[in-house]
Amino acid sequence: MTFDWGPIPPNVDPSNLWGNAREGSAVAVQTTSSVPRQQSSRDRIAVDLGGVARSYRDRRGVPIPALDGVSLRVRSGEVLAVVGPSGCGKTTLLELICSLQRPDAGKVASSPAVLMPQRDLLLPWLSALDNAGLALRIAGHSRARARARAGELFAELGLHGFESARPDELSGGMRQRVAFLRTLLSGKPVLCLDEPLSALDAITRGEMQSWLTGALLREPRTVVLVTHDIEEAIVLADRVLVLSPRPGRVIAEIAVELPRPRRGTDPAAIALREQAMRALSAGARTGEDLPGASDVL
Amino acid sequence: MSSDPASYARSERRSRDRLPRLLPATLFALIALGLWELYVDAAGVDVLVLPAPHAMFAELWGNAGLLWSNFTITAREVVLGLALALVAGFAVAVAIHLSPLLRRAVYPHAVGSQAVPIAVVAVPLCFWWGFGIFPKLLVIALICFFPVVVTTVDGLASVDPDQLKLLRTLDASRLQAFRFAELPAAVPAALSGARIALAVGVIGAFIAETSTPSVGPYAGLGRQITSDLTALQTPRAYAATAVLFAFAIACFYSLTLIEHRLAPWAHKAKGENP
């Protein structure tokens, strides 16, 4: 697979950035637990998609629409979850926001965004600490500086003592935390999380959900979280968008106004889950396409 | 970190297993030599056709000085020739990897170069570079080059496309993606190629010595073997072959050790679940 390796295209409006990646440190990490969110910054739009369409060609060159007329906006500091059946173009959506792909139609505007892929993709030859600090090395910092910065956060993420462990010596949950730290240390204002917890077992996933909630409370970022787990979406997000089966379109929007930390078993969360499930199954009935051959996308 | 349980288990296992690991190979060699000795003695095979192991070991002992002198010549050729192949092969593989045009232009010819009989190129090589070690290094490098290129190209291409996407969103340049992801992935691959190349490299040294003339009192084990065979000194030729045999084994495991040192991540302990 190839993709354009040119400079990342200029983004919408640099004044939009919640935390500018260029200025200040690549590590815009604050450890105080109560970061006041300014109303003005919350109203800024960090990600803006209008009527985005994107299709692929299969091996015989037949175009397969992945996304069809998706419009969405994410405010600075908001956590948006996108749920939908397999193959509805969720990953495509994130790659569009991260400028890894271009839309066939419509517009994509976003503050600088970083992708946290489904698999942790830690580099096996780097220690946990060096993996976490990868973005800093890429930004031109020395190895010592990158280690020092990543090291400051290791204890906080429950990784203390594993600084020099190689990825294959870490548990799945730890690897995911290192990957999240690597994403965070890129200093970009928008985090695109692609089913970040789907590879974990149920118990670890629950732990990681509460950990992620805490991390985002301490360290607010704009987050676009893609998942097929409705419960996870409701536990983590401020707002949940439901996509139809392929080609993906937004068919429902659910505001989650529950206090954090949340639990998937809270009655209010279960009610929202019902609402999302109904939207999903309604989408499946009206969709022109049944979800099949899905994991290609 | 020595307190880390994983690394403790690793070093513990290493020291405990070293001796038993050598045992099967030693036993196998003893049994094979024993059967060989029995066959030659029982069937009364002529020493010029197949010398018995005891005759070979007698030559090893009696001609240790001569064998050693020729061995140092051949060993230097193999090690330097292989190093040359490793450097050139790695460089060509990186160039091929980074430039699709170069890949289309060069790769087929790298394959074709394997079919060139050395005798054909040995003459011009000596014409250009004389009777010294350099033409022999080129012959060995030519033979060893290809396995290194193939494995390194595969190693460079083995990096997950999603890994490159990730680096891209971390603002890595193409060169940084190469440096952080592709280059380290290619190191164990190149060394695997070197181990394959080594197997042909020792034969390559034999071919190099017999196809290019030498100056000086010692011309290497390859040259010694051919002259011993024509001089009906068959046991001594077998003794020289035994030296090459042992040398190839030593080189192979040295390369494995180097690989473990340079790319420890590529060797998860077998049969051990973390």
Image (cartoon, grey):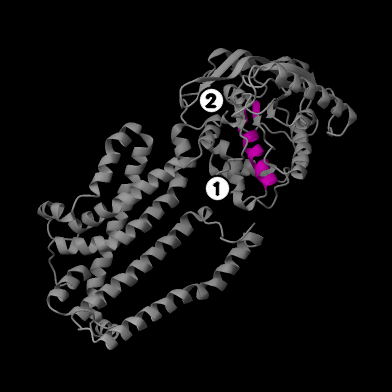
Question: Where does label 2 land, which residue?
Answer: A100
Across and down, in percent, residue B136 comes to: 20, 58
Q: Quadrant of the N terminus of chain B?
A: bottom right
In the picture as drawn, the residue positioned furthest to the left comes out as B127
Element marked by disc 1: loop
Left or right: where B135 falls relative to A76? left
Q: What residue do we see at 28% from left, 63% from top?
A: B202
Q: What residue do we see at 60% from left, 31% from top?
A: A295
| Magenta-span inclusion, residue B108 | no
Q: Are marks 2 and 1 on the same chain?
A: yes
Marks 2 and 1, Cα distance to the nearest angstrom? 24 Å
Across and down, in percent, residue A228 comes to: 70, 30
Left or right: where A222 falls relative to B120? right
Across and down, in percent, residue A1 comes to: 47, 31
Q: Nearer the viewer, residue B60 or B184?
A: B60
Looking at the picture, which amino acid does disc 1 mark?
Answer: Pro
Q: Which mark is residue A124?
A: 1
Q: Quick one: label 2 or label 1, which is nearer the N terminus?
A: 2
Instruction: Give the letter of the chain under mark 1.
Output: A
Q: What residue do we see at 31% from left, 56% from top?
A: B83
10 Å neighbourhood of mark 1: few (<14), some, or many (≥20)? some
- Range drawn in magenta: A172-192
Q: Nearer the viewer, residue A104 or A169?
A: A104
**Residue A278 location, quadrant:** top right
Does residue A131 sit above or below B99 in this rendering? below
Does residue A197 sit above or below B124 in this rendering? above
